[in-house]
Amino acid sequence: MDNETQSLEAIIENNLSGRDLDEFNRIYYGRKNHLEVKLKDSSLAAAKEADFEVAAYAFPAKKEQTRPPRIVKVGVIQHSIGAPTDRPVNEQKKAIFDKVKKIIDVAGQEGVNIICFQELWNMPFAFCTREKQPWCEFAESAEEGPTTRFLRELAMKYSMVIVSSILERDEKHADILWNTAVVISDSGNVIGKHRKNHIPRVGDFNESNYYMEGNTGHPVFATRYGKIAVNICFGRHHVLNWMMFGQNGAEIVFNPSATIAAEAGSEYMWNIEARNAAITNCYFTAAINRVGYEEFPNEFTSADGKPAHKDLGLFYGSSYFCGPDGVRCPGLSRTKDGLLIAVMDLNMNRQIKDRRCYYMTQRLDMYVNSLSRVLDLEYKPQVVHENDK
Amino acid sequence: MDNETQSLEAIIENNLSGRDLDEFNRIYYGRKNHLEVKLKDSSLAAAKEADFEVAAYAFPAKKEQTRPPRIVKVGVIQHSIGAPTDRPVNEQKKAIFDKVKKIIDVAGQEGVNIICFQELWNMPFAFCTREKQPWCEFAESAEEGPTTRFLRELAMKYSMVIVSSILERDEKHADILWNTAVVISDSGNVIGKHRKNHIPRVGDFNESNYYMEGNTGHPVFATRYGKIAVNICFGRHHVLNWMMFGQNGAEIVFNPSATIAAEAGSEYMWNIEARNAAITNCYFTAAINRVGYEEFPNEFTSADGKPAHKDLGLFYGSSYFCGPDGVRCPGLSRTKDGLLIAVMDLNMNRQIKDRRCYYMTQRLDMYVNSLSRVLDLEYKPQVVHENDK
């Protein structure tokens, strides 16, 4: 990945300065100063040793008279896979556990309260191959699988809520598969799980070959540190998915993703969608993407007229946080493993709701009415022609 | 406005080059090359003479076997007011007509098919004053007012569809006011009108002092050149407003706006919301903002603890187009009047729908069901607690 661009952030930092940099930051990020938070020397040393990036930014709120601040440290982790994809399933999984544990340890030492990984963090994103074996064997029980067991220990050790996106094997229902986010509490219990609501049928990402649309609605998990929800990957294109988490009271919505930079890829939309969701729903969002190239043993085609190949192209990382006001922090790199921490005051959500009144002005009754009519097979769109009168 | 930043675009152009510029453009705009379209020398000369900016960009689609391309030239105009706000109402209006006519003439000579202005383009944005006089006197009949009569002639002259956002006097209903977009066909007839669905109550923008939420639903206007709709200003924060225009078949949705750069302003969200709407709804969007400072005769306060003052701060222009794939063109400047033209192939909308399947994967039935339950006064949000089991 030596010839890959490190990040849009690096391009800007390397070329802009003074007033130009201030103005770029104001217009793009929403603030001139990134409010970087100092990290422990031991964290920086550990990150250097294990070759991952670490950064932290503050999202403060105004002081209130009747509520104390509600400061929460939230982390997201992006990473590449840990072993070649032709190695045995359990060896591949173990290699990822090993590299991610080093990152979680740093998060724990920094006092991170809630952490979320990228989509299907414990396996290669192999659905482009359309092969069932060995990839289906990565599936696990959400409640009792080895990944959940691995994370429970770390959750207890660091009093950390962990959001873990995995391929779920549903043994209670005919052994079917789901794309599932498991939420583990700071005391190590599985609070609950959410299954991906919107499954892509785009290019190499027709994941409905493996699992179908989720059946868990839009749960918000009341953790010790705040109310969180998970909009898994492709759901970020669906504004109603984001909206329902807001209606259910989510304060932070994570978007664990797996998305690529290749031609017709999503990279230029990455800064748009999770930020728009934060703005319109007045909550914090975290967009988390995988990192690196994942080469598979057998070649596959991508229905784009091009020759068969063995990888999808770059997963471009670039994970970031956005506040309920739409202000974001710099993202992690496009190419490197990393831990990004946001020190956020959750009081900001209600302050923004009070200020902007988006929920009060949303006219939900009108839309329930309009959208229910759209569902009618004989729906007649509201179209006005010049000669209607 | 000499010390104002010209634009984010100018900062980038002035500081980046080579691969850094290419990569910035790819990640930010969605394409390395802006596909600038050459303008006539006479247009450039007229723009220079009248001191406005003019630029044009292409949004091509792939060739299809069974449909010819559907190339449409679409323009947006951003401008400052034309006379001081203490001049007589009709004089102020006339001054704006005069300056805008020069811009429309250039659009006409460039063969623009559809054009849209900023919000309430024919008057100062005076609602921050909370005064009723003389501002209410700017209101007009949508069908027969002087602004519509002025535009009808230009529409016929240039065979141009014109979208005109005005303060409407509703003589059929007790003389009340609306914030209304009037759509005039290329033959000079009023095809119809749309009234702003979402009225802000934010800072200096509590416009419900003047008009209330619109009662015209989400009309799409079938013009000779394509199906268009208008999401007026504050509606850009409301994802369901954008969505209903898409459900009704809009191919281009205009967002005529009046929004400012001041502290806690919207500028860093400007690139986000109309783009997100284009992406999730698979249609073209155009975001259009006013330009300049508007000083009012009497001072007013902004409920922000600061002293009374006579203007809102800078309306930052920055109007732009976005394709249904989320790729955008450079915007107009933050400080100058301007005409921006997009040469778009409307075939792209269906191509993107076919590629991304966002409508097919949106699970509207689930959301109609969920949102109708949210309306219940006794709604119980879907919240999972650790001890629920």
Image (spheres, coloured by chain):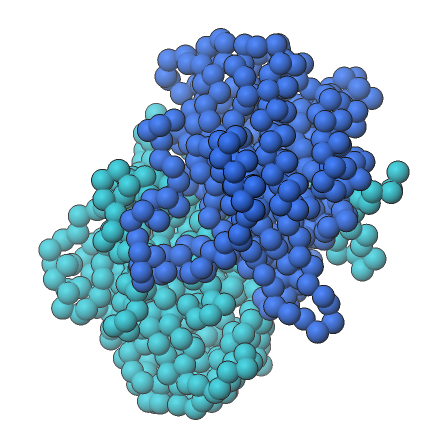
Chain colours: A cyan, B blue
Q: Is residue A327 visible?
A: no
Question: Who's the residue at 61% across and 24% down the image?
Answer: B98
- Residue nearer the viewer, A253 or B127: B127
As drawn, is B100 to the left or to the right of A327?
right
Q: Position of residue B168 (x, y in %)?
A: 71, 24
Number of numbered discs on residues: 0
Q: Is residue A39 visible?
A: yes
As drawn, is A52 to the left or to the right of A136?
left
Quadrant hosting residue B18 = bottom left
Question: Who's the residue at 14% across and 68% down the image?
Answer: A49
Q: Position of residue A222 (x, y in %)?
A: 43, 51
Question: Who's the residue at 80% across and 19% down the image?
Answer: B171
As drawn, is A177 to the left or to the right of A5?
right
Check the image and report above or below for A153 versus B167: below
As drawn, is B84 to the left or to the right of A325?
right
Q: Position of residue B117 (x, y in %)?
A: 61, 35
Question: Who's the residue at 63% across and 66% down the image?
Answer: B351
- Residue nearer the viewer, A29 or B86: B86
Check the image and report above or below for B292 versus B333: above
Placement of the N terminus of chain A among the 4 image quadrants:
bottom left
Placement of the C terminus of chain A among the 4 image quadrants:
top right
Quadrant hosting residue B7 = top left
Q: Position of residue B72 (x, y in %)?
A: 66, 53
